[in-house]
């Protein structure tokens, strides 16, 4: 089955620790995205990547880092510099980077920082 | 400023009712997306449209470019339609701008 996987579904970390969220896709999509969702707000773009070894900051990149070493994988690291890391994180991919292209979403990771 | 507004925020209806969710946007767009988010959090893309109307089963999406407005309709609503429905707009760059969502609850 083709799709996007994110792991783990729930993640708990202590304040001050870095944590890495996994995102893998086997759809052969070029573009991948990381979003953050908070209650009462629309999804906000953290980072996106249009091609391997290249990525751009989204609207709320501060305190986050990404890598795109393989087409299939786009891990997100939430660093200790992120002031309010507790949120629901969604990864998505699309055939190409145009925002008029359909995006396919993973199941999400709910991060709680204690 | 690129903005997307949805209404209503919450909608509760009886099974079988016709449902309408509205989305308006601030400036011209290249495409409008409708997404569905179930209680577990996963998001599914329902429609992408730039003009006219699209239909899939009991779901219909329309867009009026002149009025900068789109609607999502559900006919013969069912409790399994209960979810958060999100509209998102492409304002001509690589990024989508998302509305805050409409939480729909269908009562049996």
Image: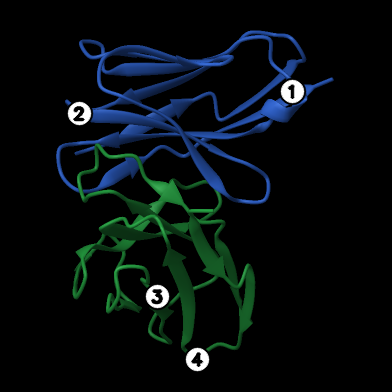
Chain colours: A green, B blue
Residue at the spot of label 1? B106
Residue at the spot of label 4? A16
| Discs 2, 1: same chain | yes
Pointer 3 and pointer 4: residues touching (CB < 8 Å)?
Answer: no
On screen, A84 above or below A91?
below
At label 3, counting other C-alpha atoms closer than 10 Å, the crowd grade (few under 14, some 14-19, many 20 or more) is some
Secondary element at tag 3: loop
Q: Chain of mark 1?
A: B
Secondary element at tag 2: loop
Secondary element at tag 4: loop
| Discs 4, 2: same chain | no
In the image, B31: left or right of A64?
left
Q: Chain of mark 2?
A: B
Q: Position of residue A3 (x, y in %)?
A: 48, 54
Front label number (2 vs 3): 3
Q: Residue at 43%, 87% (x, y): give it.
A: A80
Q: Which mark is residue B29?
A: 2
Q: Position of residue B51 (x, y in %)?
A: 26, 15
Q: Chain of mark 3?
A: A
Secondary element at tag 1: strand
Q: Chain of mark 4?
A: A
Q: Residue at 41%, 37% (x, y): give it.
A: B99
Q: Which mark is residue A75?
A: 3
On screen, A114 above or below A23?
below
């Amino acid at each position: 089955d083709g799709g996007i996987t994110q792991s783990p579904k729930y993640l708990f970390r202590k304040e001050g620790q870095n944590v890495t969220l996994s995102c893998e896709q086997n759809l052969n999509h070029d573009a991948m995205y990381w979003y953050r969702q908070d209650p009462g707000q629309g999804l906000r773009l953290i980072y996106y990547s249009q091609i391997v070894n290249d990525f751009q900051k989204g609207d709320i990149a501060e305190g986050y880092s990404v890598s795109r070493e393989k087409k299939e994988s786009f891990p997100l690291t939430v660093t200790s510099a992120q002031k309010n890391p507790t949120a629901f994180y969604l990864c998505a991919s699309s055939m190409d980077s145009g925002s008029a292209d359909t995006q396919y979403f993973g199941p999400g990771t709910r991060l709680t920082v204690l | 400023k690129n903005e997307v507004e949805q209404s209503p925020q919450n909608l509760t209806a009886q099974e079988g009712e016709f449902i309408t969710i509205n989305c308006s946007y601030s400036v011209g767009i290249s495409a409008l997306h409708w997404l569905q988010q179930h209680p577990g959090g996963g998001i599914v893309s329902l429609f992408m449209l730039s003009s006219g109307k699209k239909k899939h089963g009991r779901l219909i999406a329309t867009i009026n470019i002149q009025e900068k407005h789109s609607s999502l309709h559900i006919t013969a609503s069912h409790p399994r339609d209960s979810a958060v429905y999100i509209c998102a707009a492409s304002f001509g760059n690589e990024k989508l701008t998302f509305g805050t969502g409409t939480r729909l609850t269908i009562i049996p």
